[in-house]
Amino acid sequence: MENNMEKINMRTDLALETREQYEQDNVEISGVILREREAYEGAIKITTVIIENEHGERAMKKPKGNYITIEAMGLRELYEQEREQITEILKNELGNLISLKKGQKVLVVGLGNRDATPDALGPRVIKEIEIGENIYAIAPGVMAQTGMETAEYIHALVKEMCPDIIIAVDALAARNVNRLNTTIQISDTGICPGSGVGNHRKEISSRTLGIPVISIGVPTVVDAATIVNDAMDKLIDALSASAAFESLKSSMERMDMYEKYQLIKEILEPAGGDMYVTPKDIDENVKNLSLILSDAINMALSR
């Protein structure tokens, strides 16, 4: 039976959110494993989604591999202790994915547009990377700035430098507003820049480059239609106590989340159908997140 995920494009870069959509439809996915654990008395949640085979790839529309999600509300309002805890966990998870031998080269790539704050996470992380023997870093910019596909630029760089592994950092898109700037995703499957916002660029992965590519990302934007959809759900709940709105509530409840989402997208077109929203304190968020990610990468590469 066709799953509702096939009907519309619920835009997200997070494997965890894709898996959650199937849970809402009460659909089990063969070839996909979900593991959850908590740290620091539940303040940080770590979820691993493992896509084992081609069936899992088709269902999740993501390549086989490991997708690790670190969730911590403390990422928005960081205190020193929380920052150290999150950095330590991120460093350990990176260390589990990176297997370096002495003398091997690492290229850290900061994807995104340094001139657009929600998309500037990658370039800002690069500024804090500790360049050293066999550790290199670059922020190649975006096609609108360079006239070149980022993947082609990196492919040429790999051919010239011959690094043994790439760590790619990028801003992502989320489905859930609560995950903006509170979630870090790590993957050993590479990355397809812009996929979460419908601006698909060429893939940067071991399949295209011939070397391992570890991706790290944080969702900084969410689809406007998602926000309206969530607000509609809350409004329906708020009106449920009033008999005057009983017919409206009944009508809306007959629509599943996918039908409501599609309706909202159509209403928002063309003015805001493809609009993405970011928090008002995004400048401070990106600054803090770039320091956490760069610290964790520096620590993982110095082991």
Image (spheres, grey):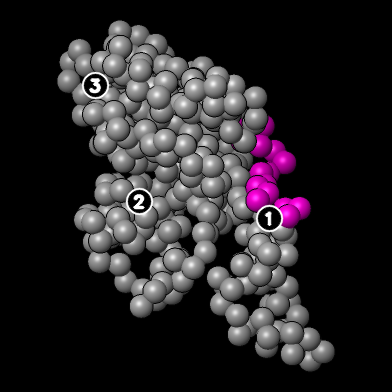
Callout 2 amino acid: Lys
Callout 1 amino acid: Gly
Give the vertical position of 34 relative to 13 (above or below). below
Q: CA distance from mark 2 to mark 1?
A: 25 Å
- Give the numbered dot on residue 62: 2
Residue 282 location (% of width, % of height):
66, 37
Residue named by callout 3? 164
> Can see residue 81?
no
Residue 75 location (% of width, % of height):
54, 41
Q: Quadrant of residue 158?
A: top left
Give the vertical position of 198 relative to 241 (above or below). above
Magenta stretch? Answer: 270-286
Residue at the spot x=45%, y=66% of the render? 5
Residue at the spot x=40%, y=48% of the render? 69
Q: Secondary structure at mark 3?
A: loop
Please name whichever residue, 128 or 43, is drawn nearer the observer in this view of the structure. 128
The crowd level at tag 3 (other Cα within 10 Å; few <14, some 14-19, many 20+) is some
Do tag 2 and tag 1 residues touch (Cβ < 8 Å)? no
Q: Earlier in the sequence, mark 3 or mark 1?
A: 3
Please name whichever residue, 95 or 229, is drawn nearer the observer in this view of the structure. 229
Q: Nearer the viewer, mark 3 or mark 2?
A: 2
Q: Earlier in the sequence, mark 2 or mark 1?
A: 2
